[in-house]
Image (cartoon, grey):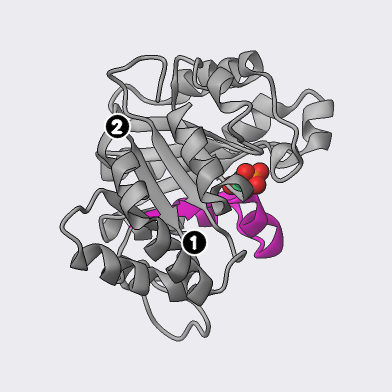
Amino acid sequence: MSTDATKKLVYVANWKMNMPAIQSTEWFAKHYEALSELGRTERIVICPTVPALFPLYSMILAKEQQTIMLGAQDCSVHAGGPFTGQIAAEDLKAIGAQFCILGHSESRTLLADTSITVARKCARALEHYMLPIVCIGETAQERAAGNTLEVLEGQLEPVLKILTETMAPMNFIAYEPVWAIGSGVTPTPEEIAAVFDHLKNLIPANLPGLHLLYGGSVTSKNAPELKKIALLSGFLVGNASLDFQEFKKIVEC
Ligand code: PGA
């Protein structure tokens, strides 16, 4: 829970490709009720692999209590056509994704996503009413060179342009320093707060629905301090979200 009792935080579980779909489905079935309870007071978004999306969505649809939301981990930059292996935003939405993580550092490095591509993917997601969660973050080298804010600005600029053009009612920017992802190391809450302050100044006044998340080695140990960051709207949780008890602690601490 946030230090401000009236503020609902968003907890995005980024499962990456860590669990096969069968295991993801079993995990979800086992923890459905407890997860739903968490979803009554906070916003819970589970982002499994694509093959697990529909089984999880079917489970939600079959239940009376539907407080858990689902998200995809990427989408194609194209709306449709001859693009072997890609998955269109329209299809992701149809199989239950209400959110879409875009521009994760693993996609930027492994799939060569540029900030322009990320912005175009953002437009695709919005066309199908999926809320984008756009990840931005500097590498250890960029940080050491004192270029953090410049890098973040560069990554954000094309995305802000798209969001302003589409007047997207709600979307999320996740600050995920590349060096903090999966490393067990995080920036201090003060450092994150300074980055958030800077980002907030870059956001046009006509985009009131833009929320800031933090991601990178979030655990139940560091979450209480991180929740004190005034502009924080929630977390993108990788490794720690695979362990239900740990994820629950992060939400409840
Ligand atoms: P982590 O991953 O929590 O395992 O550091 C976060 C992410 O990559 O989104």
How far from the left and from the top, in percent, is residue 237?
Answer: 55, 43
Number of marks present in the image shown: 2
The percent coordinates of residue 88 (x first, y second) are 39, 72
Q: Is residue 159 left or right of residue 223?
A: left
Q: Quadrant of the N terminus?
A: top left
Return the residue at label 1: 74
Q: Amino acid at mark 2?
A: Gly
Q: Earlier in the sequence, mark 2 or mark 1?
A: 1
Hey, which quadrant is residue 153 in on the image? Answer: top right
The one nearer the camera, 144 or 40, is 40
Instruction: Check disc 2: other Cα within 10 Å, few if <14, some if 14-19, many if 20+.
Output: few
Residue at 56% across, 27% down: 223
Q: Element at badge 1? A: loop
- Return the x and y of residue 64 as percentages of the image width and height: 15, 58
| Residue 211: percent from left, percent from top | 39, 31
Horizontal placement of 150 versus 56: left or right? right
Write down the region rendered in magenta: 98-119
Which of the 4 image quadrants contains residue 146? top right
What mark, if any, has residue 209 been given in the picture? 2
As drawn, 72 above or below 52:
above
Secondary structure, mark 2, is loop
Tell whether position 6 is magenta: no
